[in-house]
Image (tube, rainbow, N blue to C red):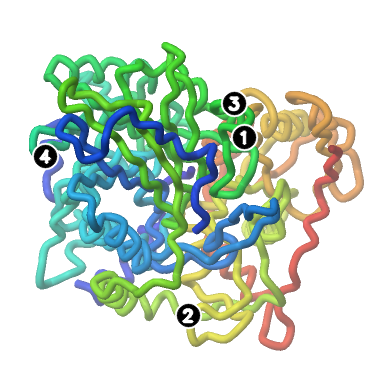
Amino acid sequence: MLPTPRHRRTHRILAAAAGLATVGALAAAMPASAGQDRSNPHHHPGSGRYQDVQLLSFNDLHGNLEPPTGSSGRVTELQADGTTKSIDAGGVEYLATHLREARQGNKYSITAAAGDMVGASPLISGLFHDEPTIDALNKLDLDVTSVGNHEFDEGAKELGRLQNGGCHPTDGCYDKKAKFRGADFPYLAANVTDEKTGKPILKPYWVWKKNGVKVGFIGVTLEGTPNIVSADGVKGLKFGDEVETINKYAKVLQRQGVKSIVALIHEGGAPASTAYNYDCDSPGAGDGISGPIVDIAKNVTPAVDALVTGHTHQAYACTIPDPSGKPRMVTSASSFGRLYTDTTLTYDRWTGDIARTAVKSANHVVTRDVAKAADMTSLISKWKTLSAPIASRPIGYIAGEIGNAGNESPLGDMIADAQLAYAKSVDPEADLAVMNPGGIRAGLTYAASGSEGDGVVTYGEAYTVQPFANTVNLVNLTGAQVITALQQQVSGANEAAPKILQISKGLTYTLDLTKTGAARVVADSVKLNGAAIDPAATYRVAMNSFLAGGGDGFAELGKGGDVRVGGDDLAAFESYLTANSSATAPYPVPTADRITVVR
């Protein structure tokens, strides 16, 4: 959920070692619980009238070709006795095998995705402008996907190149033998239009056809994409209302005789449990899920038969009533390729529509106990070889796993401290630093990922944590503005889904979750080095360029004065870790005790 991935620095390094097409045509596993199985078909399977269509779906892959590590590579499974267990999951070598096995025996099978296939990617993909992920998705036989906010990290022209192919305009071709051919599948962007022409920048919909069966797909991203992507990434674009757009194109499809319709929506919800197989229809339909997708689902036209969603990185398979009160399937498959959803759409050949009473859906774990797909292993090996000289370089040592979970995370503290240290090196007057949690894409894992040894942090691992080309900026803010910015964590655009800033050493305050809105931040508790923040005083604050632009709903941070644009944020983190750790004195795991939380 962040701005431009980092390519400016690393691609220059790769250009010599590794060696645009015009965008023009932009416009052209525990079984599911009883509550998750919606099957109650009023027909005989295999009869001439009805045809079951398999819809396999996933979302928010974010270029995770290799198995993600730490908590990012595990899912929680609810057991029959009410306990839970953790399962290692993810990796395209395993995802490919699971999808291919799931398709066996299903002649009518479609594979779709709900955005953020690329962006905020690990180094093996991000270093190459995510060409490796597009190649992997082609091999996965992905049929169609919506765009997500991260598809705009490098702007519409780069998204067009990922769709249509061609060498990167700056870094050229990485494969000297074969030019990048782009995606074999269509990216759908129904609600993303050119400000000047008013037309969608990519196809708004796509129709899958086989032996008289027709299923239409409409793809949208969240309307709030400009709030969570850098301004350059969405320049010249307009993002429309999700519901209005879907309803508009559903009518277009119906006029073309397509009555079976699926919406691919890069917006999601939050189930009451983190277990992937939690029954979010208990006690009633959709009762176990909240968030933006609920309102969207309740207002999208009944002409749409199912909603495949994403963005929140959560797992659910719920039935949320449509505007007519009829139950409709809404699904999401977590993130990073750890799950896939298998939905059965029963197509009525007489009406051309889906028999909703026969729709069933469940999420399945991409376990790592199956054979690896050889073609994916080969693909990963190719790109790892190219990236290895950069990725394997050690940059520091840690004493244990440093996670990125929680309101205040150990890694969040560490990154904020690194940015403050950098800020002080260029301006001794720097007072504090703040870091947005969405910019910390993974934790630092203690166990070795390769041959580097336990506790060794490589450049590739650090890149996975901060895969954006942000700079560390310094701005002047009054104490009153600092307090307002902290209040914006839990109010306004962030009230429904708080974004708790990670803060540098010396800054402390109380977060009272028993209150609502801005009152959750106890204003008189905000202190710097033990002294209360003076509303009238001026403070020199370090933050990444995304926050300095008011990103993630922190408008107050965008009002800073005397702006100084600093160096790369990953370079700042690398320098800090290198200077403060060694093999004999690894960096200790931060205690994450700067924010006092009252519940």
Q: Is residue 54 above or below residue 561?
A: below
The residue to which callout 2 is attached is 393
Classify 10 Å Cα crowding around label 2: few (below 14), some (14-19), many (20 and above). Answer: some
* 1 or 4: mark nearer the eye: 4
Task: Looking at the image, tell me whether mark 2 or mark 4 is earlier in sequence order.
Answer: 4
Q: Distance between the residues labelled 1 and 3?
A: 42 Å
Q: Can residue 141 be seen in this view?
A: yes
| Residue at (37% x, 38% y) in the render | 232
Residue at 13% across, 56% down: 181
Numbered circle sitting on residue 210: 4
CB under 8 Å between discs 1 and 2? no
Q: In the rendered structure, which disc, 1 or 4, sits on the residue that comes first in sequence?
A: 4
* Residue 557: numbered disc: 1
Q: What residue type is labelled 3?
A: Gly
> Mark 1 or mark 3: which comes first in sequence?
3
Which mark is on residue 284? 3
* Camera-side residue of 534 and 412: 412
Is residue 388 toward the left or the right of residue 379 in the image?
right
